[in-house]
Image (spheres, rainbow, N blue to C red):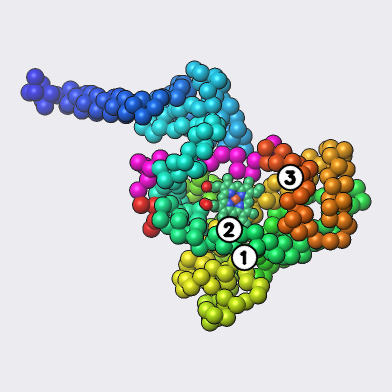
Amino acid sequence: MLKIIFENPWVSLASVFGVFTCYLLLNSYRERIHIQRLGSLPPRAPFYLPFGLDIAFRGLYTTYKHEDLNLWTWLFSHSPNKSSPTVETYIGRQRFIFTADPENIKAILATQFQDYGKGKSFHEDWKHFLGDGIFNSDHENWHASRQLIRPQFVKERMRDLDIFEKHVQSVIVRLGGQGQEVDVAALFYRYTLDGATDYLLGQSVDSQDNPQTDFAESFNEVQRFQSQVARVGPLNVLLPRNSFWRALKRINTFVEPYVEQALRMNLQDLKQLSNQSFLQAVAATGTRDRKVIRDQCVNILLAGRDTTAGTLSFLFMELSKHPEMMAKLRKEILEKVGNFKRPSYEDLKSMPYLKNVMNEVLRLYPSVPFNVSLQREDLSSSQS
Ligand code: HEM
């Protein structure tokens, strides 16, 4: 028998293929038994091409068409158990679980947080832009980032509202108010960039006054490249990178002087600054590491910009379609804040209709409609 296998190349090839297939099947069987022992297996969405290539193609196509939700609805509607908010599928050997079950999401984000993370390939894909900031780190490094920036998100820092007020005034002027057509999305993307750079670096890029700001264009270009990387996975090595590197260099060149300025200051003086920027506050913790300071600033800029600009754009679109809600909201704001005062933290907290409107906009148009987490088994050290 062995003689036939070794003498005939076709038989050898078929044997290797057979052994390999048996190995994969056995592994897959053991994995499923293991999962079943841990709890239960979710319904599996069907795939029609080998290795789930049709699912992979569907994922790429819907992302390309900006119709990500269609992938989710397709998977759930083709699940053997249509009432289940969780469905699994395989692409190659990789198991993917799609879930809209609040209990699962609670487990991933809270109760079993330690078991999940971004993972090595995410870190690799984003490391030039986000470095080791909070969005690009797992475990101890994530924890260190969290400790470092947490003080900037406490209620007492609400005096930062002054910064945003200045830029809101700039938006209001540009909204017109005479019934003319305004591209609010472009306006809000510039507003959030101005507010965020002011808050983070201590100086705004003022893109509302100068829409062609080098920094704004570079940030857009880097984000455009990163979103392509996220879509094509390992094939991203084929993407042209020249304009990405140029834009990234411009961002770093812009941020560096602020980092240097903060590091040149005596630690005591830095701590006592009355109007610390986010960057100065991070430096005042005692870190002398330029990269740590730069990375956290860029991460927060990414975190706060599109999410807020997108939400505001959808808010204005909905308000323009629902004048009765606009009137009700306006009434609440006028009663609470009046025409001229800047809203305080307490004002913002005591406007229930405003809160409901914002929640409804986020429900209808979630800025982060889905998120990806890797199970801990798949996570190796995700830091460079
Ligand atoms: C509509 C507005 C926003 C939405 C919908 C939103 C949504 C989210 C989501 C879903 C995450 C979890 C991301 C992940 O773990 O991968 C997140 C994390 C985070 N967001 Fe936001 N965000 C918004 C605005 C902001 C703003 C304005 C800032 C800061 C100025 C900010 C700072 C952060 C930070 C620092 C984290 C990381 C938290 C951590 O890992 O502990 N976000 N946000």
Q: Are marks 2 and 1 in contact (CB under 8 Å)?
A: yes
| Residue assigned mark 1 | 200
User: Is any atom of residue 291 visible in this view?
Assistant: yes
Residue 85 position, x and y percent, is: 54, 26
| Residue assigned mark 3 | 355
Residue 191 position, x and y percent, is: 73, 58
Q: Does 197 appear above or below 262?
A: above
The disc labelled 3 sits on which kind of residue?
Answer: Lys
Residue visible at 73% across and 51% down in the picture: 349
Q: Secondary structure at mark 3?
A: helix
Asked whether mark 2 and ligand 1 are closer than 8 Å, the reply comes as yes
User: Is any atom of residue 219 visible in this view?
Assistant: no
The disc labelled 2 sits on which kind of residue?
Answer: Ile
Side (left or right) of 350 relative to 118: right
For label 3, the crowd category at 10 Å Cα-Cα, with few meaning under 14, some 14 to 19 and many 20 or more, is some
Label drawn at residue 300: 2
Label drawn at residue 175: none
108, 366: nearer the viewer = 108
Side (left or right) of 187 relative to 303: right
As measured in the structure, the alpha-carbon distance from the residue carrying label 2 to the one carrying label 1 is 8 Å
Q: Range of the magenta residues?
A: 364-380
Residue visible at 7% across and 23% down in the picture: 3
Q: Which is nearer the N-term, disc 2 or disc 3?
A: 2
Q: Which is nearer the N-term, disc 2 or disc 1?
A: 1
For label 1, the crowd category at 10 Å Cα-Cα, with few meaning under 14, some 14 to 19 and many 20 or more, is many
